[in-house]
């Protein structure tokens, strides 16, 4: 509010002007003082406090004047809000614009007197006004702030009408405020008790504001941006950063030690910080005020060191999370070194695991060739190294040595000790390792080769030759993990994705897609999960997203299909991703296209004989099957098969039941088709196709009806995921027990899903620890 504007608190026709400050009522509007606001305009003004002369004389024989009654409000307020210099202003107003005569403060009365009932009128009949002297109440010491004020509000209730009268003034301040029946509390009643006559307990209202801190810091941030009220300037490079010491000290242990200890900076208004990039420091100081930060590839390498210096652990963690998401075979060694330099233990652990598990790809990038000797030895000596054979390790270290053979050949004997030569095949050991010029020219290297030969040629001596070089590296167990992608839930398309680990039986949320997708087609190509088309709740999609389970990231750098498709069938055949049928919002589709990941391009192939939306697709024996669906008019039971060698479709035996939005998977060399919807209802029935006889036969029905169901085989078991039973969107899972010939429930997803896609990825069990 503009300082030239006067703010007023009005009580009927009487007013107290507080000059350039906020109106009195506004000071009770803060969330933490909401209890005061409800009684401020009545109970506060009725909490009459005896004037100073009355306290001195103990007289109680005549009514107090309105000036005394009005002035009694002011000491209470000045004690609650010592920053308001309103006492003199009030006295000035009540005495007609003339300053009252000064009064020396009295000796302090006993504290009990301050909250006692009125002791009587002022013998001077208002002629001796109270005076605030050096922050002290004219009635004695301050009442102790808001708690004392509240005690006065509720406790001072024995005040009757005569105390409010003032024959010497033409207007009664209390009556103009609408107070009836004297000065009794609005809550406790006229007699200070409840309706049953018992003493009333003090009224309270506890309140905690969720917005106060955020609002206050937003204002502090705005103040700082204008360089207002700042008490320190931080010099970083050529930049000056204005700030408040108390804010920096509260957020950063580094600044707390600087400004509250015995350092010279604690007494200075300007400090210089070196070895920090200036933009990074500006971002971190902004974060101290705003609690917001954007970490990106362009700033993470300067933000993390600066956050380490300022001991901002939260920002260090955010930077590490960002870097974990960026891990790639081409950069994992650089990120690992960065984490080691800045003591980011969790990032270091994750980078190491990523390197070990992707060693075969890591060695193809230049970062590997630039490794220091110590780190190369650390990697090659790890039992966790994921390699098909020890030959890969030998070839990797030789490539590293020959990258700078002049300087590195001297290290070969040391490095070769960490290659498990006894685990090489005899042919490779003799024909490749033993024949290498660098190995033959070094005696220590020859000795290591001879040791390996003895281990291979003398099996009876192996128990006596065990050591680090004869210990096999831990094989990396790879298992199949089921992913449930997108779908329809609670009246809208969703982007969420979750994974099911059959080993633990747990469903866990993973990174969501960038778009919501219902009716999405999902398939796995080269251990990457593809989400094709779908509907986002408003429009049909032709965009594609690709998920990497090792990094838990989706990317949209996949070429879109030639047309929008929802309720599309998707499958992988011969290294190509096929998109079959669906609908584009205008018509039901029969055209088919396939994606070449090497060229990042879609090409059309022969169209199906029948238009199909909600179609299921499966690949078996080198053929692509399109099963059921709807032609836009009614559900289908027909089946056709695509031959990629001839680029033709052929009709096959139909199913026994019409099905659209069914689930389909290949299990034990047969195609299983489950659930879906026929002309009238959702289905629980299931059947399977034998390609040898070109026939369909029924199998036991599922426990629930499921339309829009996902079907997948995980580690040799058939799972039916989610769907719609005609009433409820489902998140339950059923697994088919072939031996018992029945379906069993095996847990639930986190989200109900209709029309979501499912895909199965083979991945190391430890990959989930990356993220």
Image (tube, helix red, strand yellow):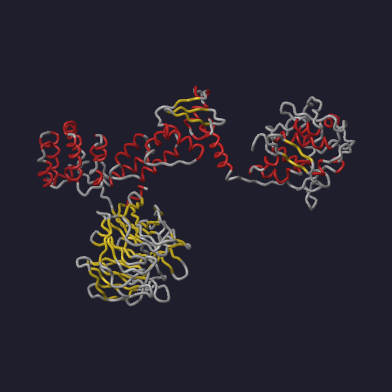
Residue 567 or residue 700, whichever sits in front: 567
Residue 237 or residue 479, whichever sits in front: 237
Q: Residue furthest bottom?
A: 656
For this view, does 241 lie left or right of residue 208?
left
Q: Quadrant of the N terminus?
A: top right
Residue depicted at x 22% and y 65%: 644
For this view, does 386 lie left or right of residue 152?
left
For this view, does 271 lie left or right of residue 355?
right
Give above or below for 140 relative to 649.
above
Query: Which x, y percent locates residue 273?
Result: 44, 27
Give above or below for 285 relative to 696.
above
Query: Which x, y percent locates residue 650?
Result: 24, 73
Query: Which x, y percent locates residue 60?
Result: 88, 35
**Residue 707 visible at all:** yes
Residue 429 or residue 271, whichever sits in front: 271
Q: Residue furthest top?
A: 264
**Can you tell which quarter of the image residue 690 is in?**
bottom left
**Can you tell which quarter of the image residue 384 is in?**
top left
């Amino acid at each position: 509010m503009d300082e030239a504007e006067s703010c007023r608190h009005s009580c009927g026709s009487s007013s107290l002007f507080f000059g350039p400050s906020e109106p009195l009522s506004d000071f009770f509007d803060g969330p933490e003082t909401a209890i005061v606001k409800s009684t401020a305009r009545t109970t506060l003004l009725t909490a009459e406090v005896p004037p100073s002369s009355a306290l001195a004389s103990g007289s109680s024989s005549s009514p107090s004047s309105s000036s005394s009654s009005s002035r009694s409000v002011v000491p209470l307020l000045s004690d609650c809000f010592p920053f308001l210099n309103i006492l003199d202003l009030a006295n000035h107003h009540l005495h007609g614009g003339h300053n009252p005569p000064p009064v020396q403060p009295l000796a302090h009365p006993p504290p009990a007197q301050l909250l006692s009932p009125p002791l009587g009128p002022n013998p001077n009949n208002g002629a001796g006004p109270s005076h605030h002297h050096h922050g002290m109440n004219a009635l004695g010491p301050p009442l102790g702030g808001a708690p004392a004020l509240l005690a006065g509000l509720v406790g001072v209730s024995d005040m009757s009408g005569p105390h409010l009268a003032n024959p010497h003034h033409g207007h009664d301040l209390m009556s103009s405020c609408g107070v009836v029946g004297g000065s009794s509390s609005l809550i406790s009643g006229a007699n200070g008790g409840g309706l049953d006559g018992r003493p009333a307990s003090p009224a309270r209202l506890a309140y905690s504001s969720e917005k106060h801190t955020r609002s206050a810091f937003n204002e502090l941030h705005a103040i700082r941006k204008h360089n207002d009220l700042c008490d320190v300037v931080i010099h970083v490079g050529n930049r000056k950063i204005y700030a408040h010491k108390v804010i920096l000290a509260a957020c950063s242990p580094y600044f707390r030690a600087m400004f509250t200890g015995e350092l010279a900076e604690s007494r200075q208004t300007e400090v210089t910080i070196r070895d920090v990039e200036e933009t990074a420091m500006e971002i971190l100081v902004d974060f101290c005020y705003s609690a917001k930060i954007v970490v990106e590839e362009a700033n993470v390498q300067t933000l993390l060191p600066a956050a380490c210096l300022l001991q901002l652990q939260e920002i260090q963690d955010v930077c590490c999370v960002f870097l974990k998401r960026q891990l790639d075979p081409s950069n994992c060694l650089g990120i690992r070194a960065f984490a080691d330099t800045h003591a980011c233990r969790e990032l270091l652990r994750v980078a190491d695991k990523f390197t070990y598990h992707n060693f075969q790809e890591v060695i193809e990038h230049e970062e590997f060739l630039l490794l220091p000797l110590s780190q190369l030895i650390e990697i090659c000596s790890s039992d966790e190294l994921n390699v098909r054979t020890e030959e890969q390790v030998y070839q990797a270290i030789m490539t590293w040595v020959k990258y700078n053979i002049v300087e590195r050949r001297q290290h070969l004997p040391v490095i070769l000790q960490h290659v498990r030569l006894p685990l090489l095949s005899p042919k490779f050991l003799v024909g490749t390792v033993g024949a290498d010029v660098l190995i033959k020219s070094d005696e220590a290297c020859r000795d290591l080769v001879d040791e390996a030969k003895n281990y291979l040629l003398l099996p009876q001596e192996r128990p006596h030759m065990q050591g680090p070089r004869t210990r096999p590296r831990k094989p990396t167990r790879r298992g199949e993990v089921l992913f449930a992608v997108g779908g329809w839930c609670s009246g809208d398309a969703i982007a969420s994705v979750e994974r099911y680990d059959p080993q633990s039986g747990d469903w866990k949320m993973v990174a969501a897609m960038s778009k919501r997708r219902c009716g999405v087609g999902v398939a796995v190509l080269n251990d990457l999960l593809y989400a094709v088309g779908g509907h986002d709740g408003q429009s049909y999609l032709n965009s594609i997203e690709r998920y990497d389970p090792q990094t838990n990231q989706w990317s949209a750098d996949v070429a879109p299909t030639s047309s929008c498709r929802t309720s599309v069938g998707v499958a992988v055949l011969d290294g190509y991703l096929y998109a079959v049928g669906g609908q584009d919002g205008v018509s039901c589709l029969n055209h088919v296209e396939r994606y070449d990941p090497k060229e990042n391009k879609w090409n059309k192939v022969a169209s199906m004989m029948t238009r199909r939306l909600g179609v299921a697709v499966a690949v078996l024996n080198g053929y692509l099957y399109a099963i059921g669906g709807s032609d836009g008019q009614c559900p289908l039971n027909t089946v056709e098969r695509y031959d990629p060698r001839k680029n033709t479709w052929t009709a096959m035996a139909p199913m026994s039941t019409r099905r659209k939005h069914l689930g389909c998977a290949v299990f034990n060399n047969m195609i299983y088709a489950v659930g879906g919807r026929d002309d009238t209802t959702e289905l629980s029935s299931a059947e399977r196709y034998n390609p040898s006889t070109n026939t369909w036969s029924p199998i036991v029905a599922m426990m629930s009806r499921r339309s829009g169901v996902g079907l997948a085989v995980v580690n040799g078991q058939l799972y039916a995921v989610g769907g719609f039973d005609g009433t409820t969107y489902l998140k339950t899972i059923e697994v088919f027990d072939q031996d018992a010939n029945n379906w069993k429930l095996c847990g639930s997803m986190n989200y109900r899903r209709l029309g979501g896609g499912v895909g199965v990825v083979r991945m190391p069990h430890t990959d989930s620890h990356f993220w």
